[in-house]
Image (cartoon, coloured by chain):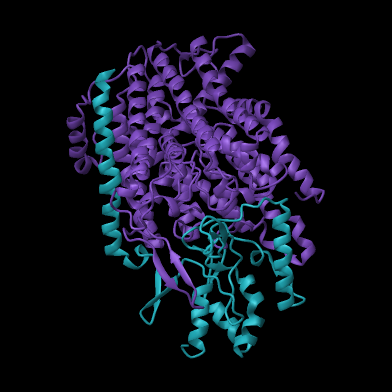
Chain colours: A cyan, B purple
Amino acid sequence: MLKELRPALVMTAALTVVTGLVYPLSVTGIAQGLFPHQAQGSLIERGGAVIGSERIGQPFTGARYFQPRPSATGGPDPADPSKTVSQPYNAANSGGSNLGPTSKALVERVQAEAERLKAENPGVPVPVELVTASGSGLDPDLSPAAADFQVPRVAKARGMTEAAVRQVAAANTTPRALGFLGEPTVNVLRLNLALDKAAGGR
Amino acid sequence: MTVNGWIQILVFIALVVAVTRPLGGFMTGVFNGGRNLLSPVFGPVERGLYRIAGVDAKAEQHWVTYAVSMLLFSVAGMVLLYVLQRLQGVLPLNPQDMAAVPADLAFNTAASFVANTNWQSYGGESTMGHLVQMAGLTVQNFVSAATGIALAVALVRGFARASARTVGNFWVDLTRATLYVLLPLAFLIALFLVWQGVPQTLAGAVDATTLEGAKQTISLGPVASQEAIKMLGTNGGGFFNANSAHPFENPNALTNLVQMLAIFAIGAGLTNVFGRMVGDERQGWAILAAMGVLFVAGAAVCYWAEAQGNPAFAAFGVDGLAGNMEGKETRFGVAASALFAVVTTAASCGAVNAMHDSFMPLGGMVPMINMMLGEVIIGGVGAGLYGMLMFAIVALFVAGLMVGRTPEYLGKKLEAKEVKMTMLAVLCLPVMMLGWTAFAVVTDTGTASMANAGPHGYSEALYAYVSAAANNGSAFAGLSANTLWYNLTLAVAMLVGRFLVIVPMLAIAGSLAAKARAPASAGTFPTHDGLFVGLLVGVILIVGGLTFFPALALGPIVEHLAMSAGTLF
């Protein structure tokens, strides 16, 4: 039995080198050479400063921007780091609400959110994506319906026609992958950047 | 449910069937020891590893030596992973200056990754530095998977050989599975993932100033290299807390399809290895067919449940057309999320692309049932095949009782020893799953960690122990599992669920290999046709139903009834 001790120790060490160092480091090297933009996090820069990643949602709150889905991420309380407080779109601490379908907290949160949105665009049903938190808390996308719901508010805040806003949204809509995988999406950050650009590069 | 949703499910199934035979053929060659198209690249590495480890690649092992080798290797890996976590504060490649992982959490994580469970009581981006992610977690992703493949192959050799004393050499199987099967596939998948938007960098987090002027810290790291083997090795431990729901782990619906395919590929291929090694590929297809029946049933129920959406929202003027989107990502929608949930629990993967805790009651019950059945549908790399072969032994034993004849499988008589060992393995799972859950729900320590009230809180604890014992690793993640109680009890469940299944399984392999082959006669029950598939599926459902229905009735089933009646907790 002791005969097997040497291979156990040597294999553990050797396979750690092969699969834990050689493999990830060579993938890193090739990835940085072939796909540097993606490998570094698909970052978007404007005027030399990083304004975010095209894959990661941002907590837009202003009326002139399309707003993302609710996010359940949290982070340490700035006043007392031992406590956790709500910090939507905290890209250093991903996660969902983990509230079950019969949770009172979930239903009350959805109700409050739905009422806020109905006041903004009365008479139109609220798409369920706009009142539910994503699994990552960092969902970069809206469904086309969820973007469409916000068009009247954005158009009014920007002094644009609804048709013009809708056109920018359509131009930033990605169809299903290969035509049938997943769902069509609108990337919120790219859409908002396009709107700023249309308004004169502010 | 939509036509498009069903097309996604059917295309996925077709792709799995399409890769089964090519992968099976390749792996059969690898484990029969011959040269293959990768030998020019990895042959020298392989021989070098044997030389420094003092392994004689031609010397085969008795099943006891095979088991001892596997156990020593697992212990060594567990110690190394524990030490790496405890020392990460003083080791390099830690750009975010992560502190040492606390002892109970480090023990839980070491047990979890060595047992191919990848239960995570921690959030990846807030706990583990790059060195632990690479040299600790990624390594176990490879070798715990390679160990699983090796064990499945050893059992298959038990069926394939007659009057033999040995079942193979663990060190050779481990090395060849790692070098020829896992490494090359993981390499290709990792590069594909980077192309599609998964980061791969040694740098730390980036601070961005958002369009509205807020500060956003974006965690980064060597994600793609870990993501690829996390799927392929059915490990499931995410680089990030949100796992494959995180846009950096799973950026679009195409990567989502590739990830699901990677979860199933090797497990499906192993059914073909089984068929080829016993000299009749139909035997492998029969096993895969039984898996397929259970898989399609689970996918249909889960997709249906999630497509319904939450009935409580309709009163607020919410258009629920998109289904139950709480905890789901826009780019996947309910169909690809429900399918992923069924795939990840049919295999012992445990990666998630949506939060199972927020699934509808019956939608969340399907993953639980998949794990309770021992993940025999495809299973983990290796684990599914040997789990399914054990159920095949039970099924044939039952059939033998019905006609009063000693059961046989592939010419091997199944006698008291095989059936006893099978029952030991089959019974240790419910003891861990139900026993610990019972403790958790009656103690304050156990209930204090539950995030949801009512039956859903109980479901969180049940899901945790089911996932741990089945070596899955997915969670109803609302449960605050990073407590002394949960870290220790879940670690015990994971270790028992892994090693008390595979040691009896190796005993069966050794015992079968030693038997002479009985020639088939007119009275032999054929094990490659529809009758056998039906019997096998029936036995799995009856054993699973008798064991777990009461536990399910107290959780998801009662929650579904409460939801239909409009009750909230």
Left or right: B328, with A111 as reference point: left
- Please indicate, yes or no, whether residue B376 appears anywhere in the rendered image: no
Q: Is residue B80 left or right of residue B103?
A: left
Q: Nearer the viewer, residue A191 or B387?
A: A191
The answer to whether residue B539 is left or right of residue B511 is right
B119 up-or-down from A196: above or below: above
Residue occupying the point 17% across, 35% down: B48
Q: In the picture, residue B533 is in which quadrant? A: top right
The answer to which image quadrant residue B153 occupies is: top left
Q: Measured from the top left, where is residue B566 in percent x and y?
A: 81, 51
Q: Tell whether A55 sits left or right of B308.
A: left
Q: Position of residue B491 (x, y in %)?
A: 49, 33
* Count of residue discs: 0
Position of residue B242 measured from the top left corner of the image (x, y, whole percent): 51, 54
Q: Nearer the viewer, residue B107 or B494?
A: B107
- Which of the 4 image quadrants contains residue A53? bottom left
Q: Is residue B545 visible?
A: yes
Which residue occupies 32% across, 18% down? B65
Farthest front residue?
Answer: A79
Task: Give me the residue at 42% from left, 71% from top.
Answer: B208
Where A198 sits versus B260, above or below?
below
In which quadrant is the N terminus of chain A drawn? top left
